[in-house]
Amino acid sequence: MSKRIAIIGGGYIGAELAKSLDNTAEVTLIEPRSHFVHAPAMIRAVVDPALLDRALIPYDRLLKNGRVLRARANGIDADGVTLDDGQRVAADYIVVATGSSNATPFKPVGDDIDGLRQANQRVHDQLNAARRIGSVGAGAVGTELAGEIAHAMPDKEITLISDTGRLFPTMPEKLGTALASKLRDAGVTLVLGKRAENLQSLTEPYAGRLKLSDGSELEFDLIFPVLGSRASSELLDGLPDTQKSTANRVKVDRWLRPSSLPNVLAAGDLADAGDGMTIVATSRQLPWLKATLKGFISGKPLEQMKPYKPWGPKAPILVPLGPKRGNSFLGLFTAGDLLTRKMKGENLFVRKYSKLLNRA
């Protein structure tokens, strides 16, 4: 009898893991959304809404043998998953990969794909009408957003605001310095080392005046609050011995277990495994998860398998500033426009994930 694996969340971890196990286990992917949301493309879609047609990919062709349940998980125990309608999904092993939330329009609110499309068009229209644009938060999303707007709409006055003294302060200095130089060349004003103190919203773009920590004020026609992701970890709150860390993430042990239940793993943005909340992190976790679950299926005890080893503080990162320019840190060196463009900027991995969901 084949093992039953329930995967909760159809994002970068869940979708690929489900497909990789489709021929070796009885796989159930539990996902409330009708479409896979390809997050990096959602940034560019603010300036190019037509990209949504390729960035939102239906799940209906993902699995050939297993099933994708369009449902929301409401509870987990050692024997399986309870859905919000009371239905049970029995499972020998459970992987929770419920991802994270971010500001509008970069991720949907709940499972509302139509609402995401509407929000994207609304923000695009606001952006078209605006002259002075403020992006508060200079992580990957905020920096890429400033670069995308500067490339597609060079007439806009764009200001990128961060409370850190330089871009990407935890990465090698060359990365942040190179990105700052290219943004300034594109006409973006950088306000670094100053905190926005009166944000009216943390989730929705709006027009207004920002007061900074040095007492200065800036007026904008459109302000994007882009202050980072927050893990969607509430499903694990009821499990025994779970602990939270920063950004609502759940602490996990060396085998990505978030609780004392031996057959429940957590991964992706949800899990504080020593990785950042990035697609790069999933590229390291996925091979380990595939090998570990195949070990489970063959009857091998978890403690006899290799524990997960995270990227750590020097994980690669790719930061395009539109389709042509950008910089990346690739572990041993900082790459420039050419490699960043070829690796991510031109296509934003859209073809890769279309192929994953059997749409290419």
Image (spheres, grey):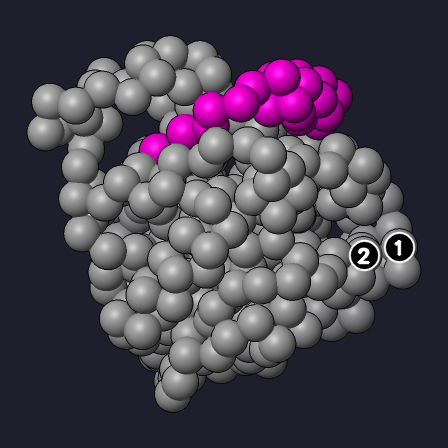
* Residue 109: quadrant of the picture: top right
Q: CA distance from mark 2 to mark 1?
A: 5 Å
Whole-percent x, y for residue 106 in the image: 56, 35
Between discs 2 and 1, the one toward the N terminus = 2
Q: What residue is shown with label 1? A: 359
What is the three-letter code of the residue carrying label 2? Ser
For this rendering, which residue is in front, 319 or 110? 319
Residue at the spot 29% in from the left edge and 21% down from the top edge? 218
- The residue shown at (24%, 56%) is 166
Q: Is residue 84 left or right of 349 when viewed as pictured?
A: left
What segment carries the magenta color? 113-137
- The answer to which of 110 and 328 lies nearer the viewer is 328
| Residue 285 lies in the magenta-colored region | no
Q: Tell me what residue is drawn at x 71 percent, y 22 percent.
A: 121
In the image, 158: left or right of 137?
A: right
Q: Position of residue 332 (x, y in %)?
A: 38, 87
| Picture quarter with the C terminus | bottom right
Q: Quadrant of residue 209?
A: top left
Q: Is residue 19 visible?
A: no
Determine whether the residue tagged by mark 2 lies in a helix, strand or loop. helix
Which corner quadrant of the image does residue 208 belong to? Answer: top left
Q: Nearer the viewer, residue 190 or 110?
A: 190
Look at the image and say whether residue 136 sits in the magenta stretch: yes
- The secondary structure making up most of the magenta span is helix
- Give the crowd class for mark 2: few <14, some 14-19, many >=20 residues within 10 Å: some
Q: Which residue is mark 2?
A: 354
The answer to whether residue 93 is above or below residue 150 is below
* Vertical order, 209 against 79 (above or below): above
Query: Residue 130: percent from the left, percent from the top?
Result: 56, 19
Pointer 2 with pointer 1, Cβ within 8 A: yes
Callout count = 2
When the figure is inspected, residue 97 is found, relative to residue 331, above or below; the finding is above
